[in-house]
Amino acid sequence: TFTSVLKIGQKLNEGKTKQIFELVDQPGLVLVQSKDQITAGNAVRKDQMEGKAAIANKTTSCVFKLLQESGIKTAFVKQQSDTAFIAAHCEMIPIEWVCRRVATGSFLKRNPGVKEGYRFSPLKMEMFFKDDANNDPQWSEEQILEAKFSLAGLTIGKCEVDIMNRSTVAIFEILEKSWATQNCTLVDMKIEFGVNVKTQEIVLADVIDNDSWRLWPAGDRSQQKDKQVYRDLKEVTPEAMQMVKRNFEWVSERVKLLLESQSRGRVVVLMGSTSDMAHCEKIKKACTSYGIPCILRVTSAHKGPDETLRIKAEYEGDGVPTVFVAVAGRSNGLGPVMSGNTAYPVINCPPLTPDWGAQDVWSSLRMPSGLGCSTILSPDAAAQFAAQIFGLTDHLVWCKLRASMLNTWVSLKVADKKLQACSV
Ligand SMILES: Nc1ncnc2c1ncn2[C@@H]1O[C@H](COP(=O)(O)OP(=O)(O)O)[C@@H](O)[C@H]1O
Ligand SMILES: *[C@@H]1O[C@H](CO)[C@@H](O)[C@H](O)[C@H]1NC(C)=O
Ligand SMILES: *[C@@H]1O[C@H](CO)[C@@H](O)[C@H](O)[C@H]1NC(C)=O
Ligand SMILES: CC(=O)N[C@H]1CO[C@H](CO)[C@@H](O)[C@@H]1O
Ligand SMILES: CC(=O)N[C@H]1CO[C@H](CO)[C@@H](O)[C@@H]1O
Ligand SMILES: [Mg+2]
């Protein structure tokens, strides 16, 4: 058997909680090694905590897996060992992006008069310049712009700041939604971005672990499971450190559950004829990209209504939440007949042709009373709408929709920036 051994190169960086090593055989990638040490108040308090690195590794890898599967661009590549993972080599942007849903901690000190528990909707964003010597001062957008950071050949300007701002909000919402499945409130979070040295893309980098967020089970501060427990310790005793470690373990066990779907739905596409197969395959492909199983069936409500209703009963009978998509050209009898006979949602997605499309579409739009089917012409959009229905109860589907919205926004932003650069 062949075991690949990582050739560790020189140490590129070392901070309070981790070391970064070059990988000799994998240019563009680095090894991120956690240290068995917990710090608070900028390392004034420093205690070794055996096993912390392993727990942190587990937490980070699960969280990054969740974000990556959702479609968020991150530096994370793969887990290497108990205490280390491989990541894209980044030049780090020295700003901590803090995102808050509930006011607590340092926010209350900086904003006297605001009571703990104040809820931010929209989320509250704050930026801090990473500068230990000055206790990480809060920075305005203008201060970041004036700093004119240049990393891996990319200058951090308005476009980049906007991208990080938007990404932080999306990442928060994804983690918040995921923790909600465990009845846990994500109170606030801090993250860092880097510029991927190979692609010059801004990606979520560094780590996300208990150091990075406040988690309140059942929204109850007294049950907090994050590093705040450690910061709040009056005295560091072995028993107290055990409690902190147990809390961290609690998180690292729960965090695995975030990757599990809470409900399983499916899309059933009914087509009036196999001549619509290509159209239906597009719907199926898009469903699959959201992680939703999609089944294709052939049935005509005009020519075999008994069979249409039998197929309907098949999918109503096993308790799996189902969205039907009806694909029928010319006169769409299929969607309306389904809609009149099932309580599940029905989406008409008629394959319109240029010659008669303008007339045919009315068979999907003008319904007898009592029918609630919707009509979406694009196969991708029909799948997206089905995903939005499942996203109400399945956080993994919701997270993919949320990340996709962010990525679309970022692409537009980058396209506009390129266009402006060309026309100068
Ligand atoms: N993927 C990466 N590529 C390069 N540097 C990284 C990467 N991830 C983290 N780093 C950097 O590694 C250093 C060590 O991390 P850490 O111990 O958290 O430092 P700090 O004490 O400054 O928070 C930091 O400067 C961090 O920005
Ligand atoms: C981040 O986005 C929010 C909401 O769009 C906006 O109010 C805020 O000014 C932005 N901050 C920065 C630094 O861009
Ligand atoms: C969350 O709370 C609800 C209602 O109290 C309960 O039914 C459910 O089992 C809890 N879920 C978890 C994962 O604790
Ligand atoms: C070996 C070990 O404990 N490392 C773990 C780090 O976290 C990942 C993701 O949970 C695990 O797969 C590794 O086993
Ligand atoms: C403590 C810390 O820095 N982060 C913790 C967050 O959660 C995991 C899971 O328990 C811990 O292992 C981490 O150390
Ligand atoms: Mg750090």
Image: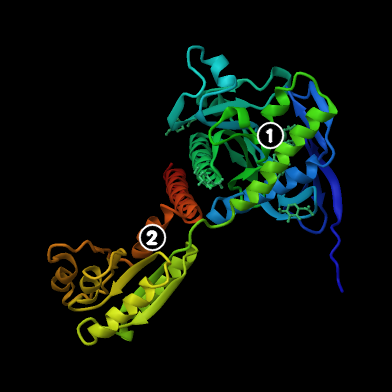
| Label 2: few (<14), some (14–19) or many (≥20) C-alpha neighbours in 10 Å | many
Left or right: 295 in relation to 138 = left
Kind of residue at badge 1: Asp
Q: CA distance from mark 2 to mark 1?
A: 35 Å
Marks 2,1: beta carbons within 8 A: no
Local secondary structure at mark 2: helix
**Residue appearing at x 24%, y 86% in the figure:** 304
Kind of residue at badge 2: Gln
Between 322 and 396, the one lying in front of the other is 322
The answer to which of marks 2 and 1 sits earlier in the sequence is: 1
Whether residue 260 appears in this view of the structure is: yes
Image quarter of the N terminus = bottom right
Residue linked to disc 2: 384
Between 344 and 4, the one lying in front of the other is 344
Residue linked to disc 1: 211
Report the number of discs: 2
Q: Position of residue 308 (x, y in %)?
A: 28, 81
Q: Position of residue 226 (x, y in %)?
A: 66, 33
Image quarter of the C terminus = top left
Q: How is the image coloured?
A: rainbow
Local secondary structure at mark 1: helix
